[in-house]
Each structure stands twice: as C-alpha cells, then as structure tokens.
C-alpha cells in the first residue's frame, strides 16, 4: 500500500512550478517507491500565478496567503519556493506547525538566517531537505561513491565553480535577487550550491580567504508581479542600484589538508550553467559540469602513458537513479529530472522517518563557510570556518 503525503507549495514562480512538475512525475518515475504526493494547496502573492499553477498542476486549492498553506490540515509537507527574504519566516511557521520542509537554497537572506532556520526545524523534529539539486545527477552520485570508497586516493586539490550568465545582460531586470536587503547575491544564489558540493565531495573546509565584486551596478526596475528572473527591461526604463555581489572567489583549506578554489559568478559571458568541479587525488582525478550533466571525466593512475589522461563515462542505467528515467546508456537526463529525484528523497524521508541529506543541517554547514567568506571579504584576511557547536 502506497502512503500519501499532502503537499503545500509557497511561491509559484520558476521553482514553484518546477517542484510541482516534479511531484507530478513521482507517480510515474517512482511508481514503486511506496509513497506518493497529494497536491493540496499552492500559494503565490500574485493571485493569477496561484490560480494558473492550480489549473496547470492540479492542486486542490490555491491561495494568496501562505498562512493558509501552513494551517491546512491535509498538508504534511511544505515546499518553500518563495524569494530568499521569506525563507526563515516560512521555515519557522512550517516547523512550528509540525510540517516537514523542503526549502530552496540558499535558505534565508544570509548565514545567520540559515542557522536560525536549522535551529527551528531541529527543535520541531521535522524532516528537511534543501534544493542543492546538482547532487542528484546520476554521475555526481557515482563520483561521490568513488570518492567515499577512496578510489582517488588522498584528495590534494578541489576546484568548484558555478559560472552562469543569467545576469550578464545589464538590461536584465532588477529582481529581488539583486537586492541586498533581500539577501546575499552570488554567495547565496550560486555559491551555496558550490560550497555544498565541495563539503559533500571533499569534506569540511577549515579556513578560507574570499573576495567579491559587483560588475553591473544599475539595472532596469521591474513592474511588481510581472516578469521573472530572465526578463529584460529597456535602456530608457528607470534603473535602480544592485546592492549585492555578482562574483565571489574563495581560496580554501580543507580539513583533510586538500587545497581548493571555489568560484561563482552570475554575469559571465560564455558559460551558461557551468556548475562543476574538478578533483585531483593521489590515485586519479575526475571532473564534471552541469553543462555536460551526462558525462563524467575520469582518470586513474596508470603505468601506460598511452592511457594517461581523462576518459569520459556516459550516464547510464548502472549509475544511481538513471534507470528511473531511461533504461539505456547515453540517453540523457536533464535538470528537471534532478528535481524529481529530490522530491522522491523528501517524500521517502517523511514516510520512513529517516532523515535525508542535504537537509537544513547541511545548509547550516554551508552557512558557516559563507559567514567566513563574508568576514574575509570585509577584513581581507584568512578566516577559520566555525565548527558546528553540536
Ligand atoms: N535549486 C535551484 O536550482 C534553484 C533555481 C532557481 C531558484 N532557486 C531558489 O528558489 C527560490 C525561488 O526562486 P525563483 O527563481 O522560483 O523565483 P521567482 O521570482 O520566479 O518566484 C518566486 C515567487 O514567489 C512569489 N512570492 C513572493 N512573495 C510571496 C508571498 N508572500 N507568498 C507567496 N508567494 C510569494 C512571487 O510572486 C513569485 O511568483 C529562491 O530561493 C531561489 O534561490 C533554486
């Protein structure tokens, strides 16, 4: 008998739609998983978005007041896909009501809010998951298993990055993402993925030095409730100031002794979604990027110089979760499939009572690294990363 979990979603923009679509795919991709979602209620401050999402995805109800989602008796789990400035209030409200939480990264405006969100969820004993979705790529899961088994030997160097051009156009609208009052810029938006991946694959970071820059300092103002992340204004539209960072660069020492660099930028030309890593160990190396999500480059130390270099694996049914989407080698998965895997992990954690990672505990670990980066870009010095007080 399959268990059913009642779902409420708050914020029906890009991610609210993506999470809804992911839940709808569970009945197909994870038909035998023993747990299925029931789309109970969706919420957006813009009524037309809430109603459109209700029609499109089949929610039983729609509302403009997120409190209706938290209070709904049939809702057991809440997806928080609203802007970062609302995350903490929403996690606190959901946790206080005993509802499980899948919160989008970066969980709040900055590291202090992420830590408070984690405390609220932990005190309430609810299950949590955070949208660090790049972890779920089959070949990233496989890379993690190789590292965990020590197949690369001792890790000496980790390079992580997220180079993205989403804000490269200076006429891209001044959305909430560029407003420092609503949260960090790239350190929250893109670098949170990079830090989470680094901690997962290479272990804790002990100290770092960081720098930041804002290259596009003015953008056209948006019309309230109209347009999204990717919309453009015109050169003669009224402009407003960008008040958070476009680019962050971190030089890091890992607790293992490995050295690394982490870089994220939202205004590059060229790269579009170059969220990736390159890891060098004493026995081999591997590298992956989301732009080629279905390829993993690997090298093992070899005595044969003719074999000495990266070779490429294609994603296939032998890699985690690939078979859920396709039984064949080399037939590609995409971004939305990662969100289906994420949704299934969240439902399974709730059904089993066994916490899943990456949850808010892992987001708190990311927050401690972000805080050291902020301290460093103010002081210009190396800073230790705080240790989890637990
Ligand atoms: N994991 C990923 O790959 C990924 C990708 C994009 C965004 N995100 C995260 O998802 C979150 C949302 O980003 P997005 O791109 O979907 O933003 P978006 O601007 O497209 O959507 C946000 C939605 O929230 C709604 N909203 C605002 N105030 C509200 C309120 N009081 N009640 C209900 N809804 C409200 C807005 O009207 C909008 O529809 C952010 O935290 C972002 O960092 C994650």
Image: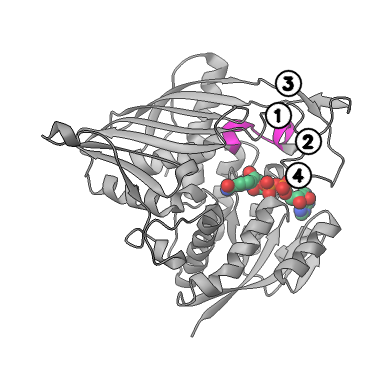
Q: How crowded is mark 2: few (under 14 residues within 10 Å), some or many (20 or more)?
A: some
Q: Where is residue 77 in the image (x, y as percent from the top left)?
A: 61, 65
| Disc on the earlier residue, 1 or 2 | 1
Does the stretch in magenta take in 96?
A: no
Q: How crowded is mark 1: few (under 14 residues within 10 Å), some or many (20 or more)?
A: some
Do residues under tags 2 and 3 come within 8 Å of each other at their CB atoms?
Answer: no
| Disc on the earlier residue, 1 or 4 | 1
* Quadrant housing residue 322: bottom left
Q: Name the residue under label 3.
A: 217
Disc 1 versus disc 3: nearer the observer? 1
- Decide: is 91 above or below 345: above
Q: Where is residue 108 in the image (x, y as percent from the top left)?
A: 64, 42
| Disc on the earlier residue, 1 or 3 | 1
Element on which disc 2 rests: loop
| Disc on the earlier residue, 3 or 4 | 3
How far separated are the C-alphas under marks 1 and 4?
Answer: 14 Å
Q: Name the residue under label 2.
A: 232
User: Which region shows up in magenta?
Assistant: 177-189
Mark 4 C-beta closer than 8 Å to ligand 1: yes
Left or right: where does residue 295 sit relative to residue 272?
Answer: left
Q: Name the residue under label 4.
A: 228
Element on which disc 4 rests: loop
The dot on residue 106 is: none
Q: Mark 1 points at which residue?
A: 169
How far separated are the C-alphas under marks 2 and 3?
Answer: 15 Å
Q: How crowded is mark 3: few (under 14 residues within 10 Å), some or many (20 or more)?
A: some
């Amino acid at each position: 008998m399959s268990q059913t979990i009642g779902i409420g979603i708050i914020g029906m923009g890009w991610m609210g739609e993506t999470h809804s679509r992911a839940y709808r795919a569970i009945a197909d991709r994870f038909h035998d998983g023993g747990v299925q979602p029931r789309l109970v209620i969706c919420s957006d401050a813009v009524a037309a978005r809430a109603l459109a999402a209700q029609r499109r995805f089949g929610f039983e109800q729609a509302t403009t007041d997120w409190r209706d989602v938290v209070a709904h008796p049939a809702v057991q789990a809440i997806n928080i896909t609203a802007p970062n400035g609302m995350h903490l209030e929403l996690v606190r409200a959901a946790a206080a009501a005993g509802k499980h939480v899948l919160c989008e990264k970066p969980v709040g405006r900055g590291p202090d809010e992420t830590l408070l969100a984690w405390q609220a969820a932990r005190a309430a004993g609810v299950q949590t998951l955070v949208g660090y979705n790049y972890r779920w790529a089959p070949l990233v899961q496989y890379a993690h298993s190789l590292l965990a088994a020590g197949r690369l030997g001792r890790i000496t160097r980790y390079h992580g990055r997220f180079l993205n051009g989403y804000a490269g156009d200076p006429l891209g609208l001044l959305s909430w993402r560029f407003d420092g009052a609503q949260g960090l810029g790239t350190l929250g938006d893109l670098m949170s993925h990079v830090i989470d991946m680094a901690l997962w694959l290479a272990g804790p970071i002990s100290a770092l030095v960081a720098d930041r820059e804002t290259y596009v300092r003015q953008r056209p103002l948006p019309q309230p409730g109209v347009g999204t992340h990717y919309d453009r204004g015109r050169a003669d539209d009224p402009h407003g100031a960008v008040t958070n960072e476009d680019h962050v660069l971190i030089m890091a020492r890992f607790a293992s002794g490995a050295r690394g660099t982490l870089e994220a930028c939202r205004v590059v030309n060229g790269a579009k979604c170059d969220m990736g890593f390159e890891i060098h160990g004493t026995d081999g190396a591997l590298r992956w990027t989301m732009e080629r999500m279905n390829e993993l480059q690997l090298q093992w130390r070899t005595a044969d110089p003719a074999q000495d270099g990266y070779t490429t694996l294609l994603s296939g049914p032998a890699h985690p979760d690939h078979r859920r989407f396709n039984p064949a080698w080399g037939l590609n998965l995409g971004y939305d499939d990662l969100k289906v895997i994420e949704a299934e992990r969240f439902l399974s954690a709730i059904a089993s009572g066994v916490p899943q990672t990456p949850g808010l505990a892992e987001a708190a670990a990311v927050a401690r690294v972000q805080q050291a980066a902020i301290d460093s870009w103010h002081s210009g010095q190396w800073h230790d990363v705080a240790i989890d007080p637990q």
